[in-house]
Every structure is written in C-alpha cells, then in structure tokens.
Amino acid sequence: MLALALLLAGGATAGCGGRATTHHKPGTSHEQASGNAGTLLTTDDGAGHRLREVPAEGAPEVQLTARPDSEDGWNLQLAVKNFRFTPDSTGGAALRGAGHAHLELDGRKLARVYGPWFHLPAAQVPEGAHTLTVRLYADDHTAWAVSGKPVEATLPLTATPGEAGHAHPASPSPFPSPGEGTAEADRTVTITVRDGKVAPAPGRVELTRGERVALRVTSDRADTLHVHGFDKELTLPAGQEATLVFTADRTGLFEVETHESDLVLTQLLVR
C-alpha cells in the first residue's frame, strides 16, 4: 500500500518525461510552455522587456533591409539566422532560436513582426532622416541578448516629400458611424478601452480563412488601432465607436493593438 501511495503521488506531481506539469494555453506543447533557454538578466531593452542572454555561438542573428514599395512606403525584409518566427506560440515560454521581432522608428515601437517581411506605410514615417531598428524577442517577450546587448539590427531611412506624395492618405482608415459596414461581416468583435483597461479581457477570436471580421472599438482617449499581419489601421476618436471591417485572408495568429497606449485588444487566430 505504501508503494502504491508513493507511485500515485509521483504521478500527480510529474508530467511529460517526469518534469513538473505546467498549465499552458491550448495548441502549445509542454516544451513551448516550460522552456527556459538562456539566462535572464536584470537589465532590459529600454522598454521594460528583460534581456535573455545566450552564448554567441549559435545565437539568433538578424539583418534588416528596406525597399521602396511601388504604391506606398517600404517593404522591409528581416533576414534571420539561428531563429524562426513562431506566431502560434507567442506568450509561451522561451525556446532558443524562436519568437518574434519588434520594429522601432527612432526608438518608438511601431509594431510586432511575426515573419520575414513587413510593409511599412509612408504615413508612419515623418519627412526627414530616421533610424529603423528590429530586435528579436522570445515567445515570453524577453529580448534575446549576447554579451549583455540585445540581438538587433538598425537601418537609416529617409522619407522625402516625393515618397510621401504617392503614399496612401496620411491618416488611418476613417471611422464609420456606429454599426456601419458590420452587416457585411461574418463575425463582429466589440471592444471597449477605458482607463488603460480592455474589456472584455484580451483573448483569441478564432476565424476561418476568408471570413470577414468587424472590429468595433470604443476608446476613452484618441488612439490608433493596428491589426498586425494585415496592415490595417483605424483611427479611434475619443469616446466614439469606430469600426474596421476586413477579410481574414491569411492564416496565423495576429494581434490587434493600439499604437499610443500600446495595449493588446485581442488576437485573431485564422485557420
């Protein structure tokens, strides 16, 4: 009886391969939820994300290039080595060589990047000389680092009046009146932002590729909504509902966030 009790106790406290079990979000593996590569440092990236040190040999690397787009802005390419983009496990644990990137303009965060290509609209780059920075992060949002420095790449970028002239309108998508356009949507997501809090709490909205989704957002302060992966933006006027309707025509996990307050509103999981 004593042996049986010990066996049952051991099974209750150990999971995959004898390691302690970890509750993690559906669709991620035990390794994705419990991995802890590298060494967590006390220093951060300047925005509150702590650095995660790994040896130089085999460490993630990134290079950044920009090509003018024929219609608007620039197409950015992130050439990575010893690294893979893992949008499906964002928010999980730190696995070496996996994660996402942040894109910054003159030290101001523009977006998270979940793949090797990203379109940067001219409307997001004021006229003049600037510095673009891409930095690699683990799924737990710590920044990969070597010798105490973040793994990143920088690139000078100059926006001229001619480039701004062929861009799309400088302001994001106009905000329609409440309810406008939602009749053509297959799914409507209603979100409220007040005092820096999102309601309902950020979660995941599952969609089938090709579905049209309407995002109805009311913010108590003026802001800009951005849908990563689809390059969709929407002006959020203070205290008024704004609606963005678009087709989810690509698969993956995409975050919807605000630019000024840097809040994650929801995630769109398109299968």
Image (spheres, rainbow, N blue to C red):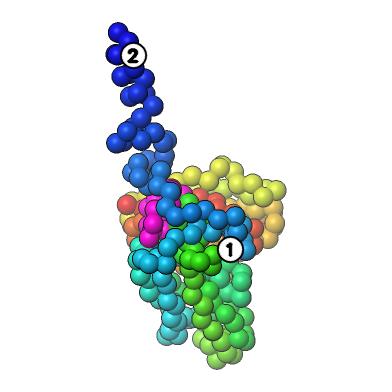
**At label 2, which amino acid type do we have?**
Ala
Q: Residue furthest top?
A: 1
Give whichever of discs 1 and 2 has the lower sequence position.
Answer: 2
**40 relative to 235, above or below:** above
Q: Secondary structure at mark 2?
A: helix
What residue appears at the point 38 percent right and 60 percent down from the top-left corner?
Answer: 97
Dot 2 crowding, Cα within 10 Å, few <14, some 14–19, many 20+ = few
Dot 1 crowding, Cα within 10 Å, few <14, some 14–19, many 20+ = some
**151 relative to 190, above or below:** below
Q: Position of residue 173 (x, y in %)?
A: 55, 67
Q: Which residue is mark 2?
A: 5
From the viewer's perspective, is 221 left or right of 251?
right
- Please give the range of residues in magenta: 86-99
**At label 1, which amino acid type do we have?**
Asp
What residue appears at the point 53 percent right and 46 percent down from the top-left corner?
Answer: 202
What residue appears at the point 45 percent right and 74 percent down from the top-left corner?
Answer: 119
From the viewer's perspective, is 204 left or right of 208?
right
**57 relative to 190, above or below:** below
Say whether residue 95 is magenta.
Answer: yes
- Which residue is more in the foreground, 37 or 167? 37
**Which image quadrant is residue 84 in?**
bottom left
Q: Secondary structure at mark 1?
A: loop
Q: Position of residue 60 (x, y in %)?
A: 40, 66
**Which image quadrant is residue 78 in?**
bottom left
- Which residue is more in the foreground, 148 or 206? 148
Q: Position of residue 262 (x, y in %)?
A: 60, 58
Say whether residue 147 is magenta.
Answer: no
Q: Which label sits in the foreground, 1 or 2? A: 2
Q: Which residue is mark 1?
A: 45
Q: CA distance from mark 1 to mark 2?
A: 49 Å
What residue appears at the point 49 percent right and 44 percent down from the top-left corner?
Answer: 203
